[in-house]
Structure formats: C-alpha cells, structure tokens
Image (cartoon, rainbow, N blue to C red):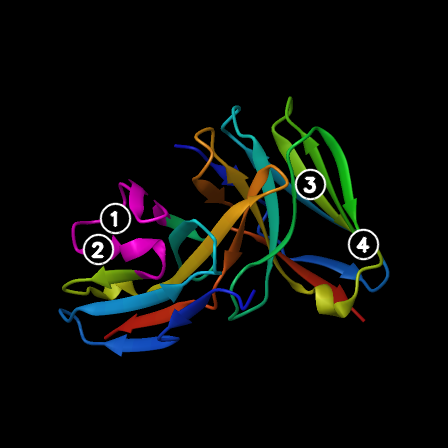
Amino acid sequence: DTGVSQNPRHKITKRGQNVTFRCDPISEHNRLYWYRQTLGQGPEFLTYFQNEAQLEKSRLLSDRFSAERPKGSFSTLEIQRTEQGDSAMYLCASSRLAGGVYEQYFGPGTRLTVT
Amino acid sequence: QKEVEQNSGPLSVPEGAIASLNCTYSDRGSQSFFWYRQYSGKSPELIMFIYSNGDKEDGRFTAQLNKASQYVSLLIRDSQPSDSATYLCAVRDTGGFKTIFGAGTRLFVKA
C-alpha cells in the first residue's frame, strides 16, 4: 500500500474564492472519509463514502461544501465562497474491513488558509 | 451530542516511565475504540484499536476498555522522548461508520 495521498498540501486563498482538494485513498479501500481539524481540536467528521455513494454528511457542513467520489476511487472536496472560518487542516482517511474492524488511515492533509 | 472527552494535558513523564492516557465517551452503544498519535503539523497515525472489554497489548502499548464505565485508556511502557505527541482517542458510533474524536492529550517525555 502506498498510503493515502492528498493534494495540494497547502492552499492559500482569498475570502470568497472557491477551492477544491483531492484525496487518493489506499487502493481497494472502499470507505473514504473527510475530516476537518483546527488547532487544539481532534478531527471533526465532515462526510463519508462507501464506494461511490455518499452515505453521511455532517449537519455542521454548510451548503458551501460538496464532496464527490466518482467511480469509487479518488474523492474531491470543494468549498465555495470561502470564509475565514474555513481555515483549517482538511484530512482524508480511507479504510477497509480487517479483523472485524474498519481501521482508518489518514492522508497528510491539506492546510487551507483563507485571507 | 455524542462526546469523547480527554484531559488536554500536557502530561509530562520521565523517560522510561509508564504514561497513562484516559478517555471517556458518551455513546453507550459504541463498539470500536481507537488510539491515534499525532505529531505537531502531521496527520493522525493509528496506534491500535480495541473492541472487547479488557486489555489489548501491542509492543509497548496497552489499550484498556471498560464499556460499563464508558472508559478507555492507553498505557505506554518504557516511554521514550519520541513518544512526545498528542494522543487522540476515537470512538466509532453505534451506526458503525462515523468516528468521533476527542481533542487529544499532549504527552511530553523528558529525557
């Protein structure tokens, strides 16, 4: 396994602009998750895919956020009309069933700064 | 609101000592429990998981679970300076796919 990869690693954008992040999960992992993490806090669940189906989306996520996972492979997370409060580390994780438990493996994250 | 609570620390232990990290959770139906280590500026790294009451050992790490008390802990034996990091407790919810993380406990191991 080559691990979960995320691009870009860093993104600086001006308020009001749209941004898109990409996540490539570990091959054959059918579950993919997006989280957001701010300083001093644990990762906060945003959304979850099983294969290509988006099965859960956090109520904390506004309509400005959208995620896709076409063909059940890579996933994208788009934030429209960014706000300063969107500044955070965006983490992607993937998992598959092993030993009766879905273990999540995180990518390196994309750090977003909204100015 | 399902919650996972951890003491934010910092917890400071001397090199070679046992570090004890604790976590409580609110969802009594939770089934799986995870410990992650996160170095500053890096993403979380899975250390181990546990889903049965009792102890589970993996090298220098031991996870302990008490579902009746809704309590999970992580013991690190022979602590090393390289163990200095934030340790995140995570709980898989009753539905089986959503994972709730605590805010983490910062651990410092003094050489």
Q: Residues within 10 Å of mark 4 (few under 14, many from 20)?
A: few
Labels 4 and 3: the sequence-earlier one: 4
Q: Residues within 10 Å of mark 1 (few under 14, many from 20)?
A: few
**Residue beneath disc 2:** A65
Position of residue B20 measured from the top left corner of the image (x, y, whole percent): 74, 47
Position of residue B93 measured from the top left corner of the image (x, y, whole percent): 47, 33
Whole-angstrom CA distance, mark 3 to mark 1, is 31 Å
Q: Is residue A99 left or right of residue B19?
A: left
Whole-angstrom CA distance, mark 2 to mark 4, is 41 Å
Numbered circles on residues, count: 4
Q: Which numbered disc covers residue B61?
A: none
Rendered image quadrant of residue A75: bottom left
| Magenta extent | A46-75
The answer to whether the residues at label 1 and label 2 have Cβ atoms under 8 Å apart is: yes
Q: Residues within 10 Å of mark 2 (few under 14, many from 20)?
A: some
Chain letter of disc 1 in the image: A
Q: Which numbered disc covers residue A61?
A: 1
In the depicted structure, whether residue A84 falls above or below residue A51: below
Front tag of 2 and 3: 2
What residue appears at the point 39 percent right and 75 percent down from the top-left corner? A9
**Residue beneath disc 3:** B73
